[in-house]
DNA sequence: CATTCCCGTGGGAGCGCTCCCACAACTTTT
DNA sequence: AAAAGTTGTGGGAGCGCTCCCACGGGAATG
């Protein structure tokens, strides 16, 4: 069953049927109605391959995720990202392809490029952060292929979408310390990661603004895991000057911190206040009353997909960079008694760029 | 850059280049080498759409997951299934497409069918269980479109792959009770689900074989959640005849059971023994020393993809049904002192079919 | 009333591949 | 030595669509 068949059944030409299928205005109403009916009756659907061949568009977008992380799917961050991309694609009537490759491996990158770009398999690709410092971005740019990286990159020529980790952290920490605590501490992420550094910088911004002596505020770098955070929090709690307020760069780590606090017979928030980051596993954080910063993953994903389409339309070469707003989710661990949700203002990075890039060219989306 | 271009560069015909690309034997070695080199040098990759159009194959397989479950991705079962399918597809050089739709919704099903089947978008589709009692399977069968359902279905005409939940449960429970406990109990899954019923049947098989009075063995139906299992286990523990061995139909529920046991001041395995099912979140189960039955999700996924290809090759109409082996993962909660892994024999269903289907036609894979 | 314009429609070309058949140049069989 | 088969190669047709141009007829314009 193809266009020609439908055309014959409707007594019109192939072109006319094509116009009806593609909602072209230049078809008279009665012809349109007749063709529509026949299409419905005969269960016709245009052949995707033929369409792609003629239009040079596949209406398929992809998400590339790194293979290295073994537990990649147990980490709900990736799961939620996938879900968000899938949702956004479906809403735009795009098909969604998942790809997994090793990053930092020339051969694997080549495989991706050949298959997707040169084989014209995809219209665009969303790249989850770990691939960043790669040949891949260069190849993609060179080939003028639409892509978006999830997570701000330090080399500022790439297309990306991210939340303003620094601004969010600054505001959250300011809120945390408004409860009168005097000995803050941070369990930060690995200092090789941009997001981890941005969150730490936001923490320090807040300290500075509030007049804390940065030298005396302990910061420990953990690996996002509950276990490591637990251990490090324990160390700090056992030190001569135990912290009375923790900012953890992720909820998992915040949970580790809370466990550590409790294991020393202390209570949250009566004795020690805690602030997390992510709010992805809402069930657990709610149960613990963990105050945290919400990452709008669905929005990040949807924005990424949109940015892909934008690149497809206009092939301008200026990088597309977008920062999304976050919300402060107030439960009880920060010291508040009543839950609340506060949308955080952004733009902390504008003045404090960690790179020497030419201009603070991010687009802040409100 | 297309076939013709390469042909011109190599001084041969389009056909010859095509043969080289597709590893056709009928090309002389020197011509093959020359063409290969030019292909590599010019970064050529065949156009997927053109290929699909000519061959009527897309080399894309899909996974359809139900939209209803809000936390679909927090549940690591789905995440692992996706990962498994993705891995298997990549290994076979297939692209992997993810689709999310509402099941039990005629319109949504129609959308899937039209887009994937009639639009020739996919070569085959893996369906995660919730879609089963649907119009979808009928449509798929009718259109002779390759599909595989994850999870045994009671209406036995469909293609599926599953683990033998019943045999696995029987063996695991037999093992559990070998430690001399006399008052077993089960926290089962929702009795609307085939897998839940199979696991319960396996439990009962074991009881019968060991000479227990089934009437007096309590079985509670929960919803796979830790919370509900916790509550039900508590009820049982507070009854006049508290159980001294629990079989939980999932690890989450087993964790709830362990919490309940501990909250009554009892110890696992000294006072009460526990057996779970799934072994997906290995980190948590290991930490708790939970003995459980391992579901080989990766194998399930890989088998599903393979079955898709099989259907593509030979379009025989006999349903393709495959049961995969499980392993008993012995840690400490069952009462054992030394960890062990035991591959379980299958075929429990062969004699005890829960349906009245014509023949026990499953293929047991060892 | 003649000319231009627009609107709705039809048909050809072409997207880049595969598959089939043709055919030349050998090799093997009769 | 003729017939048949084999091997390597080339070219045409066709997969089902879109896009462009052509064209007829009615409406708007001069």
Image: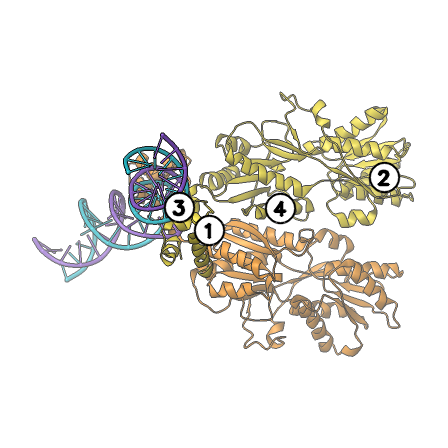
Chain colours: A yellow, B orange, C cyan, D purple
Examine the rendered structure and indicate whether residue A346 appears above or below residue B223: above
Q: Look at mark 4 in the image and give the residue it sits on.
A: A82
Q: Position of residue A121 (x, y in %)?
A: 47, 43
Q: Position of residue B165 (x, y in %)?
A: 65, 67
In the structure shown, which secondary structural element does the residue marked by tag 4 occupy? helix
- Residue A73: tell me if it is visible: yes
Of the numbered discs in the image, which one, if any, rests on residue B59?
Answer: 1
Q: Look at mark 2 in the image and give the residue it sits on.
A: A334
In 3D space, how far apart are the residues under numbered discs 3 and 4 (Cα atoms)? Answer: 29 Å
Same chain for marks 3 and 4? no
Q: Position of residue A180 (x, y in %)?
A: 91, 33
Q: Are marks 4 and 2 in contact (CB under 8 Å)?
A: no
Label 1: few (<14), some or many (≥20) within 10 Å? some
- Quarter of the view holding residue A261: top right
- Residue A72: tell me if it is visible: no
- Horizontal side, residue A9 vs residue B131: left or right: left
- Quarter of the view holding residue B313: bottom left
Q: Which chain is disc 1 placed on?
A: B
Q: Are marks 2 and 3 in contact (CB under 8 Å)?
A: no
Same chain for marks 4 and 2? yes
Quick one: A117 or A233, which is closer to the camera? Answer: A117
Examine the rendered structure and indicate whether residue A184 appears above or below residue A18: above
Examine the rendered structure and indicate whether residue A162 appears above or below residue A4: above
In the structure shown, which secondary structural element does the residue marked by tag 2 occupy? loop
In 3D space, how far apart are the residues under numbered discs 2 and 3 (Cα atoms)? Answer: 59 Å
């Amino acid at each position: 069953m193809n266009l020609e068949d439908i055309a014959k059944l409707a007594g019109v030409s192939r072109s006319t049927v094509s116009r009806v299928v593609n909602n072209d205005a230049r078809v008279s109403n009665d012809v349109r109605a007749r063709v529509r009916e026949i299409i419905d009756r005969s269960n016709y659907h245009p052949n995707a391959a033929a369409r792609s061949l003629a239009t040079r568009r596949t209406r398929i977008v992809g998400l590339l995720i790194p293979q290295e992380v073994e537990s990649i799917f147990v980490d709900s961050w990736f799961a939620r990202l996938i879900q968000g991309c899938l949702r956004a694609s479906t809403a735009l009537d795009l098909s969604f392809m998942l790809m997994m490759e090793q990053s930092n491996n020339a051969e694997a990158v080549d495989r991706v490029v050949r298959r997707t770009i040169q084989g014209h398999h995809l219209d665009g690709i969303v790249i989850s952060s770990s691939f960043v410092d790669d040949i891949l971005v260069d190849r993609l740019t060179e080939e003028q292929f639409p892509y978006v990286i999830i997570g701000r990159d330090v080399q500022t020529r790439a297309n990306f979408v991210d939340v303003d980790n620094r601004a969010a952290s600054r505001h959250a920490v300011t809120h945390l310390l408004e409860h009168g605590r005097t000995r803050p501490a941070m369990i930060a992420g690995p200092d090789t990661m941009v997001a981890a550094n941005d969150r730490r910088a936001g923490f320090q911004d807040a300290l500075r603004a509030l007049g804390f002596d940065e030298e005396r505020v302990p910061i420990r770098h953990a690996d996002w895991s509950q276990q490591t955070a637990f251990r490090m929090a324990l160390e700090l709690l056992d030190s001569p000057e135990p912290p009375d307020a923790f900012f953890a760069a992720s909820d998992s780590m915040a949970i580790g911190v809370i466990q550590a606090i409790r294991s020393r017979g202390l209570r949250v928030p009566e004795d020690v206040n805690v602030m997390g980051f992510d709010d992805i596993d809402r069930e657990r954080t709610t149960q613990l009353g963990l105050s945290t910063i919400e990452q709008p993953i669905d929005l990040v994903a949807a924005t990424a997909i949109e940015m892909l389409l934008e690149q497809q339309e206009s092939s301008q070469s200026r990088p597309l960079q977008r920062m999304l707003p976050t919300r402060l989710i107030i439960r009880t661990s920060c010291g508040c008694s009543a839950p609340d949700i506060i949308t955080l203002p952004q733009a902390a990075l504008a003045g404090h760029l960690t790179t020497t890039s030419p201009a603070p060219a991010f687009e802040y989306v409100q």
